Amino acid sequence: MSHHPSASLRKVLRPIHLWALAVGLVISGEYFGWNYGWGVAGTVGLLISTLIVTVLYVTFIFSFTELTSAIPNAGGPFAYAYKAFGPIGGMIAGYATLIEFIFAPPAIAFALGSYVHFLNADIPVMYTAVGCYFIFTLINLLGIKESALFNMVVTILALIGLAIFIILTLPHFDSRKFLANNGSFGFNGIFAALPFAIWFYLGIEGVAMVAEEVIDPQKNIPKGYLLGMSTLVLITLAVIILAGGVGNWQELVKIDYPLPAAISQAIGKENVLTKAFAFIGLFGLIASFHGLIIGYSRQIFALSRSSFLPSILSEVNLKYRTPHWALLAGGIVGLICLATGTTDKVIIISALGAVVMYAISMLSLLKMHKEIRSIAGFRTPFFPWFPIIALVLSLVCLAAIAYYNAFLTLVFFAGLALGLALFVLAGRNKIRLDDNLLQIED
């Protein structure tokens, strides 16, 4: 199939789709992954980390929304950094975003496998994990409106699941259990737990990747983001507090299904409600897994369209108007990660990509604010304080992750250095993109 210039992405998304995508992208982070943070910080330390990270995300999303509504481009952060800092800036942001979005799904696929295994011990974790990649890549090939509708249904089911979790655990909550065994972690634990706190919100910025597919982006993107963010803050705090106070939280530290395990501590593993909840919990993981596939495919598409990746990756299927090669390429990388991965490591690499991308996005906003103020449908409140707070907290998180995970950080930055070297050697840093490709609307 030849590259067809008229095959563009389709504008069909409304605020309700964006809210569902914002919540859906992230909601698996409420279901698993964060509990590894208890292992390094205890319940109190992780709660403090989560409050710090919540401030980071609230200030970041309010600032990022201005960028997304001014520059509704499928490349998201890549397009903003390109516009602010030229090709090298775009390359750094594109690399960081790709790492974040390609490394998060294998962690979720593992968790999906663990959840299914919790429900039926005869099904190996890897079977489910690999199967998910095939099924959801296929659903994504069928079109963005179909994908968004599917995403909305599973997100609402996942939210119902969290509501059930809250109802089942609230009567059993005991603050003494929450506060027990917190003595030994200290101040360091709060820093060590930051990447796991980031996992609660990681991916919400993926809404930017569907900006070209939104009806009236200036008005609708801010609505979707702000509704999504407020939903997530409420459920995050409920989950982290209740899960820690219904039994012995130390038993939940190393598993990929902490919520069903917490419910079984409260009402027993054989209780039919425990099994029912674990089944609903699958939808939370599916929503994020599916949303992240949308995110990385659009990022690969945009980088390829701008000649940062091979041009075949920006081909759009004429029938379904979806970037099929970009979808398949991201899936292959994910399957390779599955073969090597452990959940906590993959989460840390994904968080590294995220905080680097947040930092460069905030720098882009600070640099371009005057230029985009007239076209953004949304103004950052308390400018410049919000982007500055988000920038500083992103750098604090980056320093914390690097300090506690030196080897993974080295691998991440070595990859970036290699990418930049190849980029400059290939002369791609000389290419100037025209504003049409960046979809700057005057």
Image (spheres, rainbow, N blue to C red):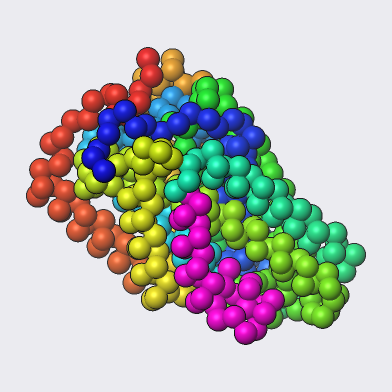
Counting from the top left corner in percent of width and height, residue 99 is at 37, 56
Q: Residue at x 39, y 75 (%)?
A: 339
Q: Residue at x 19, y 58 (%)?
A: 418
Magenta part of the protein: which range? 112-140
Question: Is residue 183 among what the camera can see?
Answer: no
Counting from the top left corner in percent of width and height, residue 232 is at 66, 47
Which of the 4 quarters of the picture holds residue 367?
A: top left
Question: Is residue 35 among what the camera can see?
Answer: yes
Q: Quadrant of the C terminus?
A: top left
Counting from the top left corner in percent of width and height, residue 279 is at 71, 66
Determine whether, in the image, residue 380 is placed left or right of residue 85: right
Counting from the top left corner in percent of width and height, residue 73 is at 39, 32
138, above or below 317, in the image: below
Determine whether, in the image, residue 381 is placed left or right of residue 429: right
Q: Residue at x 47, y 55 (%)?
A: 138
Look at the magenta stretch and give its main secondary structure.
helix
How many labels sit on residues? 0
Q: Nearer the viewer, residue 2 or 215?
A: 2
Let me know if residue 401 is in the magenta part. no
Q: Nearer the viewer, residue 85 or 434?
A: 434
